[in-house]
Amino acid sequence: RDIVVVGLVGIGAVIGLVTIARLLSWLFANYHDNIVALLIGFMLGSLRKVWPWKIDLAFLTDTAGNFVLNSDGEKIVSQQANFFPLLPPEGIVVPPTEIITAVGLMLLGLAVVLLLEWIANREEARHKRQNAPAS
């Protein structure tokens, strides 16, 4: 019974991925600059939520004023504030390894993007050379 559910979810995921990939491909071909701007906006907008350095400001409470706990017995955060790791709020210590890891991963991501761009440019140049008319 569970295998049927997993199979149906898998089939749905594959169909969804293929469909969205084709849609994105068409959108990129026809509205490249607008789609890139939209995707950059999505990424910048999500930074607030995925930012790793946060401080908890408030917790969820019930009508009696007691903290609401999750299934692990931890208080549920209702409000957070982001902070920059090099200028943490008073009383907050950010381990240097966190900053080094974050900067390292950022540089790794940049290197991967630059490598992919270099490979794409090289392939494009090779493709143009192969298809150039003979003189």
Image (cartoon, rainbow, N blue to C red):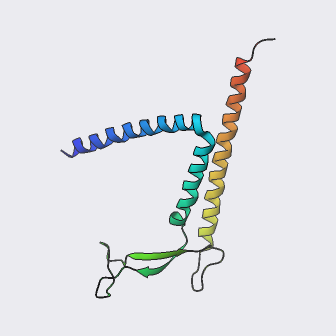
Q: Residue at x 53, y 35 (%)?
A: 25
Q: Is residue 112 above or below residue 94?
A: above
Depth check, front residue: 102 or 97: 102
Question: Is 64 situated left or right of 101 in this image?
Answer: left
Q: Residue at x 38, y 38 (%)?
A: 14
| The residue positioned farthest toward the bottom in the image shown | 64
Up the image or down, 92 lies above or below 14; here it is below
Of residues 95 and 126, the one drawn nearer to the viewer in this rendering: 126
Where does residue 94 sit, x and y in percent of width and height?
59, 76
* Residue 103 percent location from the top left of the image: 65, 62
**Residue positioned most to the right:** 135
Residue at point 67%, 36% (across, down): 119
In the rendered image, residue 59, in percent from the top left (x then y), is placed at: 40, 80
Rendered view: 116 above or below 73: above
Is residue 121 rendered to the left or right of residue 30?
A: right
Quadrant of the snapshot with the C terminus: top right
Count of numbered tags: 0
Q: Name the residue at the left extreme.
A: 1
Residue 115, quarter of picture = top right
The answer to which quarter of the image holds residue 88 is bottom right
Closer to the camera in the image, 27 or 123: 27
Name the residue located 63 percent from the left edge and 57 percent from the top edge: 106
Q: In the picture, which quadrant includes the N terminus?
A: top left
Q: Position of residue 96 (x, y in %)?
A: 63, 72
